[in-house]
Image (cartoon, rainbow, N blue to C red):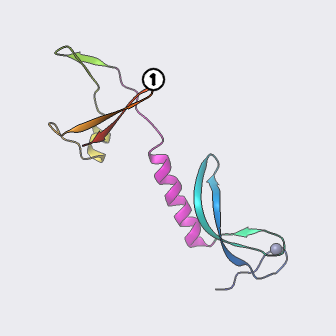
Amino acid sequence: MKITCLKCNEVMKKTRLDKYEYVEGTPLFDVPGYQCPRCGEFFFTEDIVDTMEERTAEIRRHEFGFKRRLTTSGGGLVVRVPPDLAQDLKLREGQQVRLLPIKHRGFVVEKA
Ligand SMILES: [Zn+2]
């Protein structure tokens, strides 16, 4: 497939960008694309754009967090897991999880 530059009609060359923000604030790394050897203009095919959209959505899916209030049970602190998140991660009662402390900020809960 030959792709020509819209600005200078030069045949564009396949390249890979180390970093590209398809959506501002969500950088993607190692993105394929085409670049004009004359003016440096970039071009992305529909397939590449679809992939960039998927990759951006995937990153964004993990960016948001949940606010929960701590409660107590039997002297210990309890964090309730939102049902949607539990379902998405296929978490069930009795399942083992691992708490990974983050310096001075809290912890990440991970399936064991
Ligand atoms: Zn060009």
Left or right, 104 with reference to 8? left
The residue tagged 1 is: 104
Q: Is residue 12 above or below residue 58?
A: below
Residue range highlighted in magenta: 45-69
Q: Where residue 27 appears, x then y in whole percent? A: 60, 52
Of 97 and 11, the residue lying toward us: 97
Left or right, 104 with reference to 92? right
Q: What residue is rendered at 71% in x and 78% in y?
A: 13
Main SS of the magenta segment?
Answer: helix
Please tell me whether residue 107 belongs to the stretch shown in magenta.
Answer: no
Q: Where residue 95 appears, x then y in whole percent? A: 17, 40
Q: What residue is rendered at 28% in x and 28% in y?
A: 80
Please tell me whether residue 47 belongs to the stretch shown in magenta.
Answer: yes
Q: Quadrant of ligand 1?
A: bottom right
Can you say which quadrant of the picture contains the N terminus? bottom right
Residue sitting farthest toward the bottom: 1
Q: Give the number of marks.
A: 1
Q: What residue is rendered at 58% in x and 56% in y?
A: 28
Give residue 35's quadrant in the image.
bottom right
Give the residue type that dot 1 points to: His
Q: What residue is rendered at 84% in x and 75% in y?
A: 38
Q: Where residue 55 appears, x then y in whole percent? A: 50, 58
Residue sitting farthest toward the front: 103
Q: Secondary structure at mark 1?
A: loop
Q: Is mark 1 within 8 Å of ligand 1?
A: no
